[in-house]
Image (tube, coloured by chain):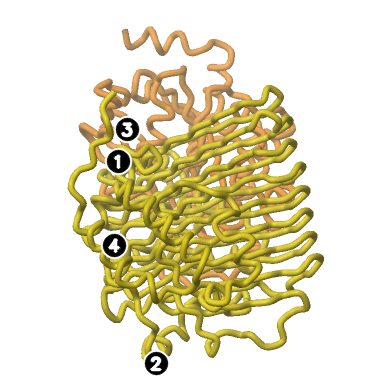
Chain colours: A yellow, B orange
Amino acid sequence: MNAEVRPLKTAAETALAASFAAAKAALPGKGSLAGLREQAFQQFNAAGLPHRRVEAWKYTDLRALMHDAKPLAGPPDAAAKARARDAGAMLASIEGRRVVFVDGAFVPELSELAELEPGLSIGSMAQALAKADALVSRHLGKVVPTDDIAVALNTAFMGDGALIRIAAGATLARPLHLVFFNAGTRPAAVFARSLVVIEKGARAMLVESHEGSAGADYQVNAALELVVGDGAHVDHIKLTGDGAGALHVASLMASIGARARFNEFLFTTGGGAVRNQLFVRFDGDDTVAGIRGATLLKDRQHADTTVVADHAHGACTSREMFKSVLDDDSRGIFQGKIIVRPHAQKTDAKMATHALLLSETAEADSKPELEIFADDVQCGHGATTGALDDDLLFYLRARGIPPKEAESLLIQAFVGEAVDGIEHAGLRDALMDHVAGWLKARG
Amino acid sequence: MPLLEVKNLHVEVDGKKILNGLDLVVEKGSVHAIMGPNGSGKSTLAHVLAGKENYVVTEGQVLFDGEDVFALEPDERAAKGLFLAFQYPVEVPGVATYTFLRTAINAQRKKRGEAELTIPEVMKRVNAMAAELGIDRDMLRRAVNVGFSGGEKKRNEIMQMALLEPRLCVLDETDSGLDIDALKIVADGVNRLRSPERAFIVITHYQRLLNYIVPDVVHVLSRGRIARTGGKELALELEAKGYAQYQEELV
């Protein structure tokens, strides 16, 4: 057995260490929170950035993708804030309550904080860390513990983000729209950390949109811890629409209570290199979860969706469906792991991933894994990769539909099968409009 | 000028000769039946006319209204009024029948320089046609052909044909897999479309369909060429005697 040999640190690893040493005294949170940071940093420092020999990061070699580490983003200036006003506009039709973050920092003056529904509270993570807020102390880093290095880096550097609580039984009349705008005024690294606690029986729809300037050079490491209480009904939709120069790594750690309904959707069209990782744990019986997504990539974009659905309790149903449309030299990755713990009998888990290749040079990788320790369960997975069906295209063309239009119709139908899993009709329409726009830009 | 002229057409599929010097002239207002044994090239002719890939034309010419068909893409042929009713209509998951019809109708209108139809206009036409063909409205909201029975798929083909108002309709074994009731509905749909400006090529293996769609001309296709041409009585003769003699004649 060879001892783990660590090569020399990369420029990015060295820069991250220097950055942490310089910034840690000023980062929000003292005492045990500072200890949490230090511990997380040491975890990173020992392991280094994840690379292709780390199984969970096999297809997204962060060590190779991160040529450098950008300096930590400073507080946004007035110009950056002004540009954030139009961010998230593609979702205007859902009339969500906008809560705006620029370069990871909460911007109250751009957020709709008046007339909050009863039971809803919205605050800044930086402030909550600074004053060691009870909710933060109770949940931070504990919702679904993981030894993932991207999460550790987020914990080490976490600056600001959202702290949201929805009280037991409360129903939000409007979707909550968390707008993350990355101004990219100068090369910067943004470490946003959010915690959303949705208590028993509450009903909420949470939409997160991430975007930034097309030419800007920035790195995002975002993490969201989400607690869904017993009997709650929660939709979480995340849109990754960053600029082509961005590296975007996002982690969701969600603990779902008993008899809950949870619908997750990942919609990815932006970013140069993207990794969305979900750690979803079922912490009560009889919950039904839909975990879906659609990814549309072109040029040299790279997007990795990695999902761990941990059935720690029994009689839960999970349905995963991920669709990707890959053009030019893009690369789409799906890794899905379903874990069924020994006592999680009557689990019903299914996972499907389908990739549509629009060019000879696009690449799709898919890695399903099932770890089943209970004997009375139903689990399954399916994966397909292929080009558009020639017979279907011919049928459409024989009816007078020109080739590009025929392709678009079939691609929209392909993506639509996943998008149809979203309950909110307005949001479905907004996403399909975006798909239509993406197809139109394809020419 | 004839609506369609096929001259000495030779076609190969995967290096195998299927059509072998086929000649055919179809005038406006006429109904031509093409009959023949399995493997004689009937479906190949239909697919070549519509422009399917992988059919290699090695010799010959096809003129549609005087224009070289092989210079046109499949969608351009459709917009000029050439329609193929498929023997095996494909299922198109995720594309609602209404959306599909609207896209096809408007794509053709656009190409012809006509104004596009609005959604209500399309729905009105589609609903009226569906009612005539006994197609349930629920089917129109469903994805094209997905979960349709064989008869429903064929009726859907005829509905598309009626809505797109082509000048030349090629029906590729539309009768296969239909029971007698469905056959009558399909034949009625076709007969309603008969007009002095429109022609039909009805490809079939059996004479039965021709009791309902009465042809002006019947051709027997054998080994990739027209072996015999006659009136509607030729179909009855084929029904009585079978195709054996045509296969032998060419040996």
- Most foreground residue, A317 or A187: A187
- Report helix, strand or loop for mark 3: strand
- Most foreground residue, A283 or A29: A29
Amino acid marked by disc 1: Arg
Percent coordinates x, y for residue A417 in the rendering? 57, 49
Please indicate whether residue A30 sits to the left or right of residue A115 in the image.
Answer: left
Q: Mark 2 lies on which chain?
A: A
Nearer the viewer's eye, disc 2 or disc 4?
Answer: 4
Numbered label attached to residue A78:
2
Amino acid marked by disc 2: Ala
Q: Is residue A219 above or below residue B152?
A: below
Q: Residue at label 3? A: B23
Residue placed farthest to the front in the image? A31
Q: Residue at label 1? A: A52
Q: Are both tags, 1 and 3, on one chain?
A: no
- Which residue is found at the position 57% from the left and 84% from the top? A111
Q: Residue at label 4? A: A16
Contact (Cβ within 8 Å) of mark 2 with mark 4: no
Q: Which of marks 1 and 4 is nearer the N terminus?
A: 4
